[in-house]
Image (spheres, rainbow, N blue to C red):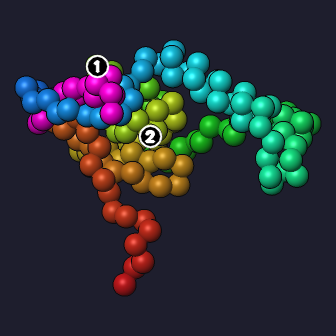
Amino acid sequence: MRVDDWYLQRLKGAGGFSGSFVVVWGARPRPMMQQQCRFDEFVEVYNNDRPHQALGGRYPGEVYTPSPRVYQPPEEPEYPFHDRTVRVTRCGRICIGHRKVNLSTVFAGQVVGIREVEDKIWLVSFMDYDLGYFDEEEARVEPGPNPFVPEA
């Protein structure tokens, strides 16, 4: 093992603050552009420089043919029974006026429906699923009942 293979990794504690470090062995994390270049090189080698047994010794670049169909993105969901339709931000928030409600980055860029179910309590839905509820005091969506649990 070379000394270059070791580096310090800062540990984040509660609230993201900590003075603790741990010594880590392995490749040091690389900047995004450097990672992209390495990935592009890998794709080039994988598709054009090495034969594949499953393809009878041919290269994937030789076998691949683009689809003749034009990609049509799905239509955005509609929420006719909800009060508002909102697009989730890249950081996973629902913005309503000056209020920011944390949902999840999983839904970044997606359209969700919100409906006031009680005074100042809102239901958040994605497609046919109710995700959870938020109120005007909390800045996050709390999960609702699990729709996949069998009813007894």
> Which residue type does callout 2 highlight?
Val
Q: How many marks?
A: 2
Residue at x 14%, y 29% (from the top left corner): 21
Which residue: 44% across, 26% down?
90
- Image quadrant in which the C terminus is located: bottom left
Camera-side mark, 1 or 2: 2
Residue 4 within the segment the image draws in magenta:
yes
The label shown at residue 23 is none
Mark 1 to mark 2: distance in Å?
22 Å
Q: Position of residue 50 (x, y in %)?
A: 77, 37
Q: In the figure, residue 61 lies in which quadrant?
A: top right
In this picture, which residue range is highlighted in magenta?
Answer: 1-14
Q: Earlier in the sequence, mark 1 or mark 2?
A: 1
Task: From the image, tell me which residue sits under label 2.
Answer: 106
Q: Residue at x 72, y 30 (%)?
A: 45
Q: Is residue 94 left or right of residue 7?
A: right
Mark 2 secondary-structure assignment: helix
The percent coordinates of residue 116 (x first, y second) are 34, 44
> How many residues crowd around disc 1 within 10 Å: few (fewer than 14), some, or many (20 or more)?
few
Q: Residues within 10 Å of mark 2 (few under 14, many from 20)?
A: few
Q: Tag 1: residue type?
A: His
| Residue 73 x/y as whole percent | 71, 35
Residue 130's place in the image compared with 14, above or below, is below
- Residue placed under numbered mark 1 in the picture: 98
Q: Examine the rendered structure and indicate whether residue 30 appears above or below residue 12.
A: above
Asked if residue 26 lies left or right of residue 109, the reply is left
- Quarter of the image that includes the N terminus: top left
Q: Is residue 122 above or below residue 19?
A: below
Observer-nearest residue: 36 or 110? 36
Q: Disc 1, disc 2: CB below 8 Å? A: no
Q: Residue at x 37, y 39 (%)?
A: 104
Seen from the viewer's position, the closer of residues 134 and 120 is 134
